[in-house]
Amino acid sequence: MTAPCPCGRASANSTKATKNQPLPFSACCGRYLDDFAGTPAPDAEALMRSRYSAFVRGRPDYLLATWHASTRPSQLELDPAAKWLGLEVRSHQLMDADHAEVEFVARCREAGRATRLHERSRFVRESGRWYYVDGNQF
């Protein structure tokens, strides 16, 4: 797919022609969503971005699979009418080798009303995979 990734990650290439261009979904979050078993997100920020993309693409299977078992709900229903408008990653902090926090703001329109989710999410790495644990909303 050549469509831009919903997470908004841009290319960091140094050439003027490609610098700050949105990465295609297939080269960004798509590789994690489409092959979770074989291609885990390499860090907490990439996992958080891929989880945002899963919300945009209506993929509760991926969201549940990347949610830590200690806090994972038994099921997850997404609002198909929700329109995700953008993601801003404010910080990514590695606490130690297996714990990290990512602060972000995600914008959405639900039932014609704009909403904003500002959260500091906690992630844990187990057996080489990162998982979302929980978060504090602002």
Image (spheres, helix red, strand yellow):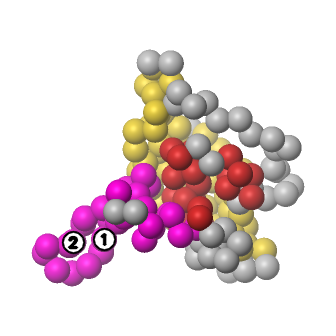
Q: Quadrant of the C terminus?
A: top right
* Label 1 sits on residue: 11
How packed is label 2: few (under 14 Cα within 10 Å), some, or many (20 or more)? few
Residue name at image x 25 percent, y 64 percent: 21
- Locate residue 115, reporting x and y percent: 48, 28
* Type of amino acid at the residue the image marks with label 1: Ser
> Is residue 58 rendered to the left or right of residue 28?
right
- Circle 1 crowding by C-alpha within 10 Å: few under 14, some 14–19, many from 20: some
Whether 32 is drawn above or below 122: the answer is below
Which residue is the extreme one toward the front?
Answer: 1
Q: Is residue 57 above or below residue 34?
A: above
- Residue at (30, 75) in percent of width and height: 12
Q: Secondary structure at mark 1?
A: loop
What whole-number distance in Å separates the C-alpha atoms at marks 1 and 2?
Answer: 6 Å
Q: Magenta: predominant secondary structure element?
A: loop
- Residue 135 makes an appearance in the image: no
Pointer 1 and pointer 2: residues touching (CB < 8 Å)? yes
Q: Position of residue 99 (x, y in %)?
A: 69, 70
Residue linked to disc 2: 19
Going by the numbered disc 2, the residue's amino acid type is Lys
| Residue at left offset 71%, top offset 72% | 37
Residue 74: quarter of image: top right
- The stretch of residues the image draws in magenta is 3-32
